Image: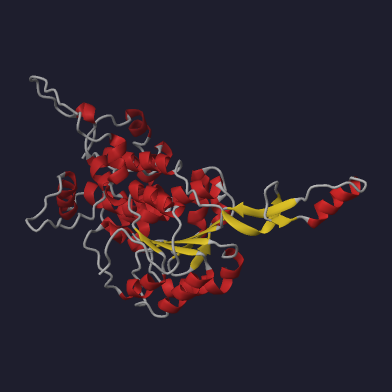
Amino acid sequence: MTGPGIDTGLLAGAQQHAPKGRLAENVVHFVRVLRAAGLPVGPARTLAALEAVETVGVRNREDFRAALAAVLVSRYEQLPIFEQAFDLFWRNPKLLEKLIASLLPKAFSRSGEAPPDPELPARIAQAMLPPAADLPREDGDEIDLDAAFTMSPREILQHKDFETMTTEELAAVRGLLRNLRLPLPELPTRRTTPSPRGHRVDLRATLRRATGAAGALSPLAWRERQRRTPPLVVLCDISGSMDRYARMLLHFLHAITNDRDRVHVLLFGTRLTNITRHLKHRDVDVALSRVTTAVSDWAGGTRIGACLEDFNRRWSRRLLGQNAVVLLISDGLDAEGGAGLAAQMERLHKSCRRLVWLNPLLRYEGFEARPAGIKAMLPHVDDFLPVHNLESLTQLASALETPHARGRMRSPHTIH
């Protein structure tokens, strides 16, 4: 399996490392597929891959896979893409079927329900396609299309699910996420500030004016309560079922962390990790690299009750003062069956001014709160909103701007 446009100079320099046959060209082409799928692999990694293949040989498929993964994968989140690209490129028939399925439009049954999506990401399917310039073109009459009633690419991205996006679409969405903001309403605090139209007399300023007036009448000085946006605390689930959404939302969380003060972000899977300090770095790539290094339970299990108990015990008093707003990003699928989750959610709800639960499962119209974890969490939230595309994040900003009565849950769907 070779592809057009392979760097002949690179192959010539690596002939001493390559075994007989065209394996060297196939390895170089495989690296190009990984690069098209979003992995940062360059010429140095290609040479290292050729050396690794020459060292372990090709008799054992698992050794061959492990050797390429050791030199081409630098982060844990890149491993699923590598594994799927490897099985597809080196001829796994099952994944070839998934490739074809991911490139075809979705078909709906008579009942209106869509079949389950293939597990193969669209970015892998797109990376395996030949470049557009190499595709055969048929000579014929040009067809003019009227696009007056079609959606623009940006409108399509607004409604498209993060899980079904290609590499180019994910890159475009990351740029849009960096420009999103959460305009929290300003709330009155206990502190006061001088004001010409306040509601409380400032005795010190009034006496100071009277002393300087030498016995003449002086107007009263007034003070009013300061207004300030409340702290924002984000608790984000990074378990295996939330992996794709958590990675995209980290770009959004990085933007709002650097846009305003008093924003705290904590990730949880099987344990709780505070990443606020890492997200403070202005460069998003450096910030996410530090987050990856700090988190050890990414894409693992989920212990929501234990992690919330840890937060309530260690972080609640420090972070939830001054009318804090809490964003809980999770699908509610708890590995422990919701043990102790209701009590911890109740405590969290009572410790903050507003608790907003963002759940990507709400993208389904027929969502039902059947899992034990969701049933335990749902009675203790103020807002229950989806978080699976750009439009849902825009709706979140609008919801936070609107005052909400305590004790009445707001959700765009009817929960059964």
Regarding residue 29, the answer to whether it shows in the image is no
Quadrant that contains the N terminus? top left
Q: How was this image coloured? A: secondary structure
Nearest the eye: 227 or 83? 227
Residue that appears at 11% across and 50% down: 107
Q: Using residue 368 as the reference point, say whether residue 294 is left or right of it.
A: right
> Is residue 34 positioned above or below 415 on the image?
above
Front position in the image: 40 or 71: 40
Does residue 78 appear anywhere in the picture?
Answer: yes
Vertical side of 206 occupied by 339: above or below? below
List x then y, in percent, for residue 174: 40, 43
Q: What is the number of callouts on the image?
A: 0
Q: Quadrant of the C terminus?
A: bottom left
In the image shown, does 8 or 344 lie closer to the viewer? Answer: 344
Tell me which residue sits at (26%, 64%) in the image. 414
Q: Where is residue 292 in the image (x, y as percent from the top left)?
A: 48, 55
Residue found farthest to the right: 214
The picture quadrant where one finds residue 409 is bottom left
Give the x, y percent position of residue 79.
36, 54
Q: Quadrant of residue 411?
A: bottom left
The residue at the point 47 percent across, 70 percent down is: 349
Q: Residue at x 14, y 58 (%)?
A: 113
Vertical placement of 103 versus 338: above or below?
above
Of residue 98 and residue 311, the one placed in the foreground of this image is 311
